[in-house]
Image: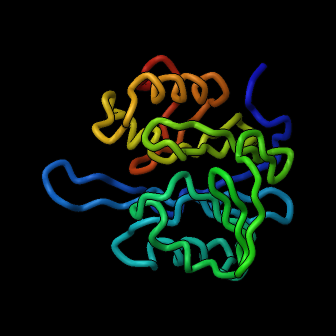
Amino acid sequence: MTDAPLGRSAVYTILTTGYVGSTGPGVAATVSYISDGDRHVIFDPGMVAHRDRILAPLEELGLGPDDITDVVLSHHHPDNTMNVGLFGRARVHDHKVEYLGDQWRNRDAEGYELTPSLRLIRTPGHSAEDITLLAGTASGVVAFAGDLWWHAEGPADDPVAPDRDVLRASRLRVLTAADLIVPGHGGPFEADGNAPR
C-alpha cells in the first residue's frame, strides 16, 4: 500500500526557492503554492529576504493573501513558519491541529486529506513533528517535505535530526510514495536512487 493520494488533479508552483548558507547565517525557505479545486494552499511560508518573494509570484497567479484557504506547516521551526501571518483567513495545518482565527480542531495529520489529491502524512526526522504534503498531480505525486531534506544533497546526516534512523525511515516512506520532492531550502529533485536516504 502506498501513501500516495488517489486523486491527480492538484497543480503547484514554487513561489520562491530557498537556500541554506554554508558558511554564513543566511537561510530562506522554499515556499510553494498548491491548488486543487477550491483549495488554495501555501506550504511552509517561512523566512525569505522580503515578503514580496512570496506575495509577488502569488500575485502573478492572480491571487492575493485572502485567496489562500489553507497553510500547511511542515514543522514549527521559524525558518519554515515566519510568514504564516500573511494568510490571516487561511486554515493552518500542522502535525496535530487545524487552526482558524481563534479556534482550533484537534486531528492527527496522518492520512488527513485536504482533498482527494492532497494528503498529509507524518514524517518525523528533522523534528518529531514533521509532516509532508503529498500532492497528486497530472505528472505524478509531488512531496512537499519541508526539512526532511534541506535540498537535493540532503544533507545525508541532518545535524539537527534527533534520531537518524527515524529520519531515514521517513525519507524512505516519502520516496516510496512520490515522484518529485520539494525540499525545505532548495529546488525540487526526483525521488529516485540519487535522493539521500
Foreground of the two, 147 or 66: 147
Q: Quadrant of residue 157?
A: top left
The image shows residue 60 at horizontal and vertical percentages of 60, 75
The scheme the figure's colours follow is: rainbow
Spot the residue most to the front.
Answer: 106
Q: Residue at x 44, y 46 (%)?
A: 187
Rendered location of residue 196, percent (x, y): 40, 25
Compared with 24, 47 (above or below) is below
Say which of 148 and 61 sits in front: 148
Q: Quadrant of the C terminus?
A: top left
Q: Is residue 175 above or below residue 58?
A: above
Vertical relation: 16 (above or below) 143: below
Q: Is residue 125 left or right of residue 178?
A: left
Q: Camera-side residue: 98 or 37?
A: 98
| Camera-nearest residue between 23 and 93 | 93
Query: Residue at point 54% right, 57% down?
Result: 14
Q: How many marks?
A: 0
Horizontal side of residue 166 vs 139, given as left or right: left
Instruction: Give the image location of residue 71, x and y in percent.
Output: 65, 65
In percent of width and height, residue 147 lies at 44, 45
Residue found at x 44% / y 78%: 51
- Among the 4 quarters of the image, the one containing residue 172: top right
Left or right of residue 64, residue 106 in this image: right
Seen at 65% across and 46% down, the residue is: 133
Q: Quadrant of the N terminus?
A: top right
